[in-house]
Amino acid sequence: LWLKALRRRRGSQSPTLGPRPERTRRSMTFRLTEAQIEEYRQQFKIFDIDGSGAVSRKELGTALRNLGANPTEADLDRMMTAADHDGGGKIGCQEFLDLMAKMDAEMEGLTEDDILREAFKILDREGKGELQWSQLREMLMTRGDPLTEQQVNEFMDMADRDADGSLDAKEFRRVMRM
C-alpha cells in the first residue's frame, strides 16, 4: 500500500506550499516537489505521535503499520540508520524528508512486476518459492485492514488456482493485479 501511495505522489504537482528545505550534502529533498514536501511534512506530524518534533523507531513502525506496511525489525533498523544523520536515535523533519526522497528515488523506474516480485520475496521468508496458506491467513486476518474468516476463505479460493494449499509467485502476481 505505501509503495503504491509513493508512486502516486511522485508525480504530484501543486503551487508552492512553503519554503523548500535547505539542501545539504546528504539531502535528497531537491528531488521532491513543493507539494510532496508539504505532504510529507503533514505525514511527519502524524507519525510524530508524542509531538516531540522527532519520530522514534517505535513511532515509525507504528505509522508504517497503520499505513498497511509490515516492516520487520531489520527494516526499521535500516530506515533509522539511513535517516538518522545526526545519530540522535530519532528522525527529525528534515531527516524524514530525506528518507521519503530516497524512497521515492528508489521507486523510480520500478515496474509493477518489480514491486510484486520484491513483495513476494519479502513474504517468502523461507525462500521456497511459495507462500503457505497458514502464513497468509494469519497476515490477512491480523495486519493492515484485517479480513474476516469468510473474506480470507474467498480470497484463498480465488487465488489458489491449483488448489495445492499454497500461493506461488505466478498466482501471487495474478491475484495482486485484480
Image: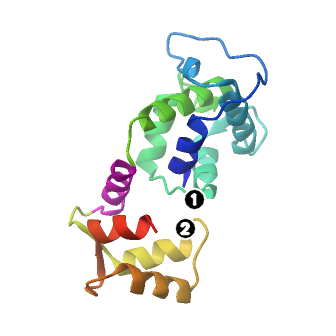
Magenta highlight range: 112-125
Labels 1 and 2: the sequence-earlier one: 1
Type of amino acid at the residue the image marks with label 2:
Arg
Check disc 2 and report its element: helix, strand or loop.
loop
Check residue 115 for magenta coloring.
yes
Q: Are marks 1 and 2 in contact (CB under 8 Å)?
A: yes
Q: Residues within 10 Å of mark 2 (few under 14, many from 20)?
A: some
Q: Is residue 48 left or right of residue 115?
A: right
Residue 16 at x, y percent in the picture: 76, 21
Q: Residue furthest left?
A: 128
Residue 68 drawn above or below residue 166: above
**x 76%, y 35%: residue:** 52
Q: Main secondary structure of the magenta part?
A: helix
* Helix, strand or loop at mark 1: loop
* Relative depth, front residue between 72 and 178: 178
For the point 66% across and 37% down, the residue is 55
Based on the displayed image, in which of its 4 quarters is residue 142 positioned? bottom right
Give the Cα separation between the discs numbered 1 and 2. 7 Å
Q: Which residue is at 47% across, 87% downward?
A: 153
Q: Dot 1 surroundings within 10 Å: few (below 14), some, or many (20 or more)? A: some
Q: Is residue 169 left or right of residue 6?
A: left
Expressed as whole percent of the image width and height from the top left, the position of residue 24 reads: 56, 10
Residue 149 is situated, as x and y percent measured from the top left of the image, at 54, 87
Q: Nearer the viewer, residue 121 or 50?
A: 121
Q: Residue at x 63, y 57 (%)?
A: 66
> Hey, which quadrant is residue 144 in on the image?
bottom right
Where is mark 2, residue-wise?
Answer: 143
Mark 1, residue position: 68
Q: Is residue 176 above or below residue 23?
A: below
Which quadrant: the N terminus?
bottom right
Q: How was this image coloured?
A: rainbow
Name the amino acid type tagged 1. Gly
